Image: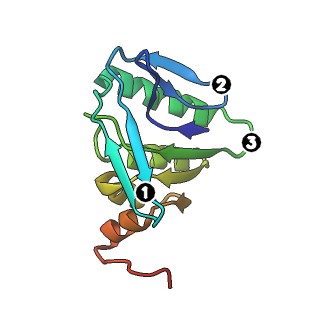
Amino acid sequence: MTLTPLVDREGHMFEMSHSGHPCATYQPTRTNLEIIENNGIVTEILELACGPSAAKLSAVQAACKKRFSTKSEAMSVIFSGSLPAGAPVDRYAGLIQLAHEFRCRAYLDTSGEPLRRALAARPHFVKPNRDEAAGVLGLPIDSLA
């Protein structure tokens, strides 16, 4: 199961899972652009997006709990992407804790304060890029060695 804040062009938010459960947010969506130069320099242009309502956030939480509790085999869950505007910064941390309650493996790919908070929930695997890792560690990472 993958849970990522994904919104289509019509403003429908999806909880991405094996079956997918769309929840309409009726909010404008955003466009993200990543420019990778030949020398490896990456420039990201990220628009701000409107966030889902508290009711929609609760609906996703309930859907996750239901899905985690009814699994028939070991489940892996991926929490990926930036959190939508208005979502609490500990959102992924709470969802990872919920996944652990039902013996699901939790994987994480996010950045900033949500990453820092989610690390305390001890996901099974974390995929930070160099800048994200440096931000969490509070140290520059100047080489791969």
Give residue 121's mark.
1
Mark 1 and mark 3: Cα distance apart in space: 22 Å
Image check: 50 left or right of 101? Answer: left
Q: Amino acid at mark 2?
A: Ser
Tell me whether the residue at label 2 lies in contact with that at label 3, contact meaning CB atoms closer than 8 angstroms: no
Residue 99: x, y in percent? 53, 45
Compared to 79, does 6 lie above or below? Answer: above
For label 3, the SS is: loop
Marks 2 and 1, the one that precedes in the sequence = 2
Residue 118: x, y in percent? 39, 55
Q: Amino acid at mark 1?
A: Ala
Residue designated by label 3: 73
Residue 84: x, y in percent? 33, 35
Q: Total marks drawn?
A: 3
Residue 44: x, y in percent? 36, 49
Residue appearing at x 42%, y 50% in the figure: 35
